[in-house]
Image (spheres, grey):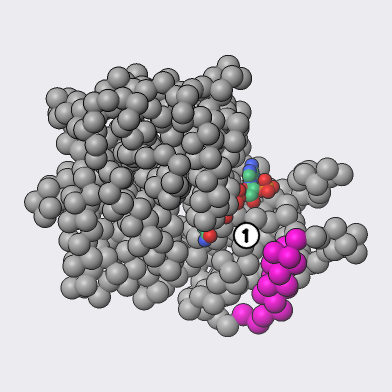
Amino acid sequence: MSNDSNESSRPIRIAIIGSGPSGLYAAEALTKQRDAPVSVDVFDRLPTPYGLVRYGVAPDHQKIKSVTTALQRILEHPNVRFLGHVEYGRDLTRDDLARYYDAVIYAVGAAADRALGIPGEDLPGSLSATEFVAWYNGHPDSEASALTLTASGVAVVGAGNVAIDVARVLAKSVDELAATDIADYALDTLAHSPVTDIYMLARRGPAQAKYTTKELKELGELAAADIVVRPEEVELTPEEDAAVTENVVRRNIEVLRGFARKPLEGKPRRIHMRFLVSPVEITGQGRVEDLRIERNRLDERGRAAGTGVCETLPVQMVLRSVGYKGRPLAGVPFDARTGVIPNESGRVLRDSAVARGEYVTGWIKRGPSGIIGTNKVCAVETIKQLLHDAPDLPRATQGDSAAVTALLDERGVAYVTLEHWLALDRHEQELGKARGRVRVKVLSRATMLELARRGA
Ligand code: NAP
């Protein structure tokens, strides 16, 4: 890191807020280019890096999680510094960043969930997939008591990959989860799970579902769960069939028809995949007891329209998995309707005009869509704008990398460095090795901080 006080000759100082894939791919794009020397600080409010790779990707998807090897290499680059356990808006404000950095990139993802807006949604037993995912992944903002699993019937609302993750984790046997890095308490709760029937509810048809085929196929390969699909719900009219242009949709429909043909094997659990149904009311005395759903048809614009024909599902838990949305950051523009920071190819817009030195990438830029790799392309676009603007960006008055850590020290912020994180990482993997698991996650922030410092 340069301590050069000559503002124009020092590297461009860039702060990235968020160390998930979107933030780290932005850091990578900055270090890979040769146009301008850079010095990058990646902040995260958590003591751990990797965002949704650690706390979103399902624990039984270790192959997807192995992207952390590549993400770690980005953090190890000599021009990149990790500063975890530093919360934007609390430990560092927008004004601080303007003093210490020439440019800021917001890469905070989309942490909030969407609601269904139906009666009974607030009853105990009705929760968001976001909460369930945070619980089984041991997110430090969640805890063991965030979920009691007493339901035999569970509805999972939504037809995306998160709905599949949630249904699959609920349907798996404890043996299928035991070697993963699922939170200890979640493994214990799921080992005693009374769940027998999981209803996945798509408001539109199979051709409109957002699943990727690999994830969909996996549902048919579970040790402890049969898959139940009604043949009539996955048939398309000749017009609908002719309108299918995407290969992924065609492949998904083939998989679903295969499920519909497959005889049940008498496994202890069943996943019922339903199409063209919407939840209309959750009922129960003080807790979820039933879910009323209505059959839909597609209107002329391809939207779900109710038919008035209803049925009731015997479920005691409802998990809504109907997409994420961004949360506003203090001092940063936010479009509440779309849940993103308004931007033009990654340049933040303030009152419709480009804001100098402010950029955005990932889900908070484009909305919650795409797979992990999509964020690479997204980051490259943002960094292209930043590098184009760089020669004209006003230089920060305190562009020395030591100044910002001095400020954090002064404020009593116990920031976590890469060395700290790697110590915690080793500790978790060693715990896992001793117990035949890929890793055992440390769950509380306080213990994480203590172990990270002790081991570094
Ligand atoms: P998503 O793919 O956008 O799916 C959201 C689903 O919710 C859609 O089927 C949508 O239906 C439905 N929905 C929205 N509002 C609804 C309502 N009021 N009632 C009923 N259904 C409603 O979102 P996601 O599943 O949260 O996933 C987010 C992103 O992460 C996606 O890009 C996904 O592929 C990715 N992801 C990938 C993996 C993986 O690769 N293994 C795993 C998890 C997540 P409509 O289409 O009708 O709006």
Residue located beneath label 1 in the image:
211
Instruction: Determine whether, in the image, residue 282 is placed left or right of residue 415.
Output: right
Residue that protrudes farthest toward the left in the picture: 454
Residue 134 inside the magenta-drawn segment: no
Residue 267: where, in percent of width, then height? 52, 78
Query: Picture quarter containing residue 404?
Result: top left
Quarter occupied by the N terminus: top left
Residue range of the region highlighted in magenta in the rendering: 246-264
> Which residue is at a point 81% across and 50% down the rendered structure image?
297
Q: Residue furthest right?
A: 239
Q: Is residue 428 shown to the viewer in this render?
A: yes
- Main SS class of the magenta portion in the image: helix
Q: 21 or 237: which is nearer to us?
A: 21
Task: Give the residue at x 21% y 28%.
Answer: 403
Mark 1 residue's CB less than 8 Å from ligand 1: yes
- In the rendered image, residue 182, in percent from the top left (x then y), is placed at 33, 62
